[in-house]
Image: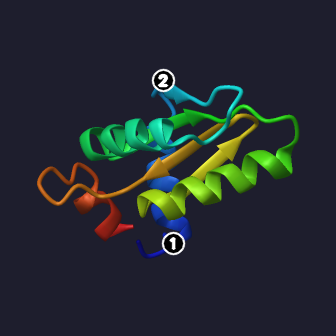
Amino acid sequence: MKSLTSPQRQVLRAAAHHLNVVLQTGARGLTPEFTAEAEQALAHHELVKFKLVASDAADRKAMAEQLCEALGAAHVQQIGHVAVLYRENKDRARFREQLRRA
C-alpha cells in the first residue's frame, strides 16, 4: 500500500471520527487469529479502528506498524490505544473519489 498524503489522511481521519472500535488485542497481542479478523474487517469496511492493548506508546506504535505490514494497510492515525487503518477495497472503494480529490 502506498503511503497517504497529509490531505488524504485528513479525509480519512474525519471519516473515522464517528467509527467505533471493531477489534481489540488481548493479553497475547497480535496473534494470527487477531490478524485474520483484522483482515476481514478491512476487506469489508476499508477504514477500521483497532484498540491495541500494550503498556507503553512505543509498543502500541510498533503493533500498529506490524499490523499495517501484515495487512498491506496504511496507518491513518493513532490516539492512545486506538489505531485507525485504511486499505482500499477495489470492489467497493468508498473513499476513492474523496482521496483522489485530496
Residue drawn at point x = 72 percent, y = 31 percent: 53
- Farthest right residue? 56
User: Image check: 83 left or right of 100?
Assistant: right
The residue at 36%/56% (across/down) is 87
Query: What colouring method underlies this structural image?
Result: rainbow
Query: Which residue is label 1 attached to?
Result: 5
In the image, is 90 to the left or to the right of 55? left
Q: Secondary structure at mark 1?
A: loop
- Distance, label 1 to label 2, CA atoms, is 24 Å
The image quadrant of residue 83 is: top right
In the image, residue 41 sits, relative to residue 39, either above or below, namely above
Amino acid on which the number 1 mark rests in the picture: Thr
Q: Is residue 69 above or below residue 84?
A: below
Image quarter in which the N terminus is found = bottom left
Left or right: 90, with 98 as reference point: left
Q: Position of residue 89 (x, y in %)?
A: 23, 55
Instruction: Judge from the rendering whether residue 74 lies leftward or rightward of residue 92; answer left or right.
Output: right
Q: Residue at x 39, y 67 (%)?
A: 102
91, above or below 35, in the image: below
